[in-house]
Amino acid sequence: MHKEPPMPDPRPQVDTHEGPAVLGAACRSCGHPMATQRPVCAACGGEVVPAKFGPSGTVYASTVVRIAVGNRTPPYALAYVDLDDGPRILAHVAGNGASAPPVASRVRLVAPADGDVVVEVMS
């Protein structure tokens, strides 16, 4: 019986060797940034090259999740973050999770937790 290979993790990967950075791709033609590796540009279909994004960004939107999802204990905060010169990513917000960071807050990547991208609010 033929066994299918496991699906790759669809979440953005974070490299912490030289400070946290999202390992993604950028288009050679149009410059479109992508948070995950892809065979071609999602915007124009052009050739892509590996790229790193971060470590800082701005909160585009955020929320507090108050129901259990998987093994996560609520409440926990999530934020869409526009990385400086990079893509928009979904990230967990470090802290107690009782409040979400306001829109336009500055955040920075920290070490991932359980494979998830994590940011903290900059003071």
Image: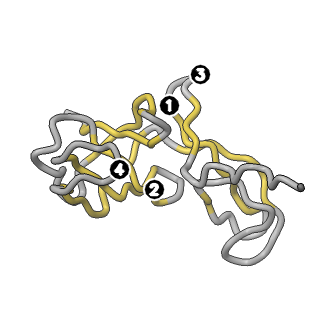
Give the structural element (helix, strand or loop) at label 3. loop
How far across and down, in percent of the image, does residue 75 sit?
A: 16, 47
Give the structural element (helix, strand or loop) at label 2. strand
Q: Earlier in the sequence, mark 3 or mark 2?
A: 3
Between residues 114 and 80, which one lies in front from this camera angle? 114
Instruction: Report the residue marked by disc 3.
Output: 17
Residue at left offset 69%, top offset 57%? 26
**Amino acid type, label 1:** Pro
Number of other residues with Cα within 10 Å of mark 3, as a class: few under 14, some 14 to 19, many 20 or more? few
Q: Is residue 110 above or below residue 13?
A: above
Camera-near label (4 vs 3) is 4
**Amino acid type, label 2:** Ile
Give the structural element (helix, strand or loop) at label 1. loop
The disc label shown at residue 89, or none: 2
Number of other residues with Cα within 10 Å of mark 1, as a class: few under 14, some 14 to 19, many 20 or more? many
**Amino acid type, label 4:** Gly
Q: Quadrant of residue 2?
A: bottom right
The disc label shown at residue 70, or none: 4
How far across and down, in percent of the image, does residue 29 sit?
A: 78, 68
Asked whether disc 2 touches disc 4, contact meaning CB atoms under 8 Å apart, the reply is no
